[in-house]
Image (spheres, grey):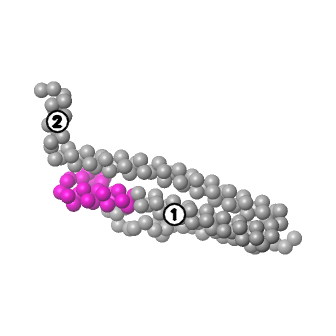
Amino acid sequence: MSIYADTLELQTNNDYKGITMEMDIWAIWSTNRIPSAIMGLTGMISIWIAARFASVMMEKGANLLGQITVTVFGLCVLLMNAVSMLMAQTNWNNTAKAFAALRDSGTEISPLAAEFIEKYGVNDPSLTNTPVFLVLLISVLVLLIGTVWLQPKK
């Protein structure tokens, strides 16, 4: 029997299909983490840009329109970061749902996939799932508002 024939025989085995499907889910999850990391890095850079804009505009003595513009920009940056975080959480949540669907179809899943379901399949994406990130967003909001609107009079 050739190696190719052995491979064909394995592909007809239900256990092998379950392992392949689980590995596919892991691969998709892993691949989807790349854009999440890029969005996270982009978010941190955009927060720095917003804080820098606020600082420079206030040093130059921005008028009311400038203050409003920088505030709106900063709020958009914070909203973009919140959406990015929710999208990253959605990847984890959908992966847990995919593992649960695979398990519910009668396919045996690995203990790691079962633990993944228990840990990440419980909650829908929410900023309260990641309190550190929520504190970061609130502190950036306070920093931007404080820089733009609470400057001491010269």
Q: Name the magenta segment's main secondary structure.
A: helix
Few, some or many residues within 10 Å of mark 1 (<14, 14–19, 20+):
some
Q: Which residue is mark 1?
A: 83
Name the N-terminal-most of marks 2 and 1. Answer: 2
Residue type at tag 2: Leu
Tell me the quarter of the image containing the N terminus: top left
**Above/below status of 33 relative to 146:** above
> Residue 53 falls in which quadrant of the image?
bottom right
Please state the horizontal and vertical placement of residue 98, each as a whole percent of the image.
Answer: 30, 57
* Range covered by the magenta-colored residues: 92-116
Along the viewing direction, whichever of 97 and 143 lies nearer the viewer: 97
- Looking at the image, residue 96 sits to the left or right of residue 40; the answer is left
At horizontal 27% and vertical 53% (from top left) the residue drawn is 111
Which residue is at the far left? 1
User: What amino acid is found at the position of numbered circle 1 in the picture?
Assistant: Val
Residue at 84% from the left image edge and 73% from the top image edge? 153
Instruction: Answer with left or right where residue 92 lies relative to residue 45.
Output: left
To which quarter of the image does residue 101 belong?
A: bottom left
Secondary element type, mark 2 = helix
Given the current orientation, which residue lies at the most extreme front position? 65
Residue at 36% over, 46% down: 27
> Which label sits on residue 25?
none
Which residue was labeled with disc 2?
8
The image quadrant where one finds the C terminus is bottom right
Specify the quadrant of the image occupied by residue 134: bottom right
Q: Is residue 139 visible?
A: no
Q: Of 134 and 32, which appears nearest the observer?
A: 32
Residue 69 x %, y %: 71, 67
Which of 119/75 is in front? 75
Residue beneath the point at 22% across and 49% down: 18
**Above or below: residue 106 compared with residue 63:** above
